[in-house]
Image (cartoon, grey):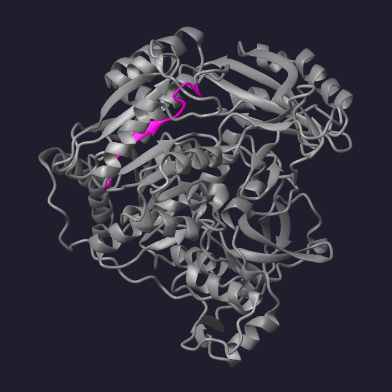
Amino acid sequence: MQEQAFFHEGERVGVLTTQPLGRVLDYRAPEGGCHLGAYVEVPLGPRRVLGVIWGSGAGDFDSAKLRPVNRVLDVAPMRDEMRQFLSKSADYTLTPLPAMLRLATRVSGLSDPVSMRKVLRAGDAMPDRMTDARQRVLSVVDEYGGLAFTSKELADLAGVTTSVIKGLIKQGALREEEAPRDLPYPKLDPNLPSKTLTEDQAAAAQALGDAVAGGSYGTTLLKGVTGSGKTEVYLEAVAAALRAGRQALVLLPEIALTAEFLKRVEARFGATPAEWHSGATMTERRRVWRMVGQGKAQLVIGARSALFLPYQNLGLIIVDEEHDTSYKQDEGVCYNARDMAVLRAATCSAQVVLASATPSLETWANAEAGKYKRLDLKSRYGASVLPDMKAIDMRAEQLAPSTWISPTLKRAITARMERGEQSLLFLNRRGFAPVTICRACGGHVACDHCDSRMVEHRFMKRLMCHQCGATKPVPEACPTCGVEGKMAPVGPGIERLGEETAALFPEARIAVLSSDLFGSARALKARIEEIAAGEADIILGTQLVAKGHNFPLLTLVGVIDADLGLQGSDLRAAERTFQLMRQVAGRAGRADKPGEALMQTFQPEHPVIRAILSGDEEAFWRAEAAERQAAGVPPYGRMAGIVLSGPDLPAVMDLGMALSRNDMPLRAIGAQVFGPAPAPIARIRGRHRVRLLVKAAKGTALQDAISRWIKPARLKGDLRLSVDIDPQNFF
């Protein structure tokens, strides 16, 4: 039966609110009526909350007692396809529908009426007296480029009071303007000339463009070696979407990638698109949300949550570096943006392009099975060639104690510096040292709130827990035995590697790229631009340097510890190590000079290391697929993680044991339950964590069985239960 599209004043309507109530509530339509999908403000107890007209009311409540909708918001109504997407996402991830709606409305000022507002930009004058507070304000304005701020937003970002802002306005250091709250984004021109494409690129671009023009759903794996020009290919698919009058979304795994990418988009289409990520101001995020809903933002460049924007006519979704683990959200609503992109496209007849040099095994298997199309770019663009990859056998190297750069790697770096070329040293560990131990008793410094060792961050002069963010000073005396002067850092972090590099190469300009060392995403992006312009000789980086950056002068990549990801019980350990090593090696030699990648390893004979060095990626995927298939694990089986948590360990374990004993709904579909057992990180932020793992055959109705399994569970007091379908991490 067709849904009612409009509700007249006084008619019973069902409103889904963002509040954790678990069901749609009945109200009366307001004066003037309302459309299906309208964003509304409704009374809930003494409060007024945001909601969406989800359909007709249930009719199980006395209509005389129904309260009316307060008002309809002046924004475009939610489209049917978006309601379907949220409902299907909720069913797949076993997330309450109100929580999905919160994801889709996570923007401030949504209920504000359209009006003019006062915004602040950089002025022409400097203040007569510079204080620390004023300097912070001007630094924020400079850091965000030409973006406008409200007075409160700027004060919050700079950590000052609004009186500081007012003083800078009076002195002309800030300029106050009247501006519409939300302006449309400039039109992009898909017919501007593109770069000259190679034969492979042109064929791939044509195939993607034809698929987009067809107006139907489809998913394509765009697999190309690092530096093969995947971006130029899928920008032609964006052009095809724009010509068809449809919107496009490009998901990037790292905010720091957006600066260079935006320049490429502007060069191709003549204007800058909309940005949606944590580095954008809340004022700008509200503008993006509204303009996307009105169809006045043709292209959005964003993080994973950009999938939940209210697109009016979405025709294309690009998931760049689709293998990247940052696309998986592990807290709150647990979802994988790669999988949700496919679901979103299916609901609105759009095309999905999954782009990667090292695709996830799930995507590779879907392409092998014919579920996804596959396009390959087998050579680098222009004069650049793939780097020469070699292993450095650390068993044969002579290193001084507490040093990690081998003599072989040192010689290679020296040679690059003499030629005016850049080198990159990669170590996937933040901080100075991963462990601080007492040399008297062997005790280590642990977090007070988590079962996690604290990591020394020397630039902060503190220890930090990477689970909860708690910090404490480096102790003079051992917390365990009380002996003073025996605390010592053990193992290398990226900061410690920086000290060693500075000692070995005192004349070198060294840049350290780690998310801990930058106060904002824009500061990180600015530093990356400086490096790309040649303002560093040696770059030290953690995982974020492997994510698509282009440094033209970089010809050497040195991996300090290639064995780091090979240990442990994670079923994806081999896959992730292979992807990370191939990706970071791919930063070298992307211009006209040949590149080289040297991997320091104590296990040069390990199958994964051999596969990385040989470059036979298809053989690696086939071998990895065979192992997973034999074990019946994803992508050839299904898994779900259940994490129970609470302040009282016996209560958490009792709940886990009760679930384990009463597993009839799971056994009915042939699923197995493993656990309960303490999670690998058994306590975070003072909450004890117990984990159960569900394993089932591919094709089983796992979500329905889990729903019936956990429904009787009684979460008393502060007990919490979370479900992670298709878990990527097992912490």
Q: Nearer the viewer, residue 75 or 38?
A: 75
In percent of width and height, residue 81 lies at 47, 50
Residue drawn 31% across the image and 61% down it? 263
Residue drawn 78% across the image and 15% down it? 662
Q: Nearer the viewer, residue 471 or 507?
A: 507
Q: Nearer the viewer, residue 76 or 530?
A: 530
Q: Looking at the image, which residue sits at the far top?
A: 630
The magenta stretch spans which residues? Answer: 553-565
In percent of width and height, residue 670 lies at 61, 10
In the image, residue 506 above or below residue 172 = above
Relative to residue 688, is residue 228 drawn left or right?
left
Relative to residue 52, is residue 274 drawn left or right?
left
Quarter location, residue 217: top left
Relative to residue 536, is residue 169 drawn left or right?
right
Count of numbered circles in the view: 0
In percent of width and height, residue 438 lies at 75, 27
Residue drawn 55% across the image and 76% down it? 138
In percent of width and height, residue 170 lies at 60, 92
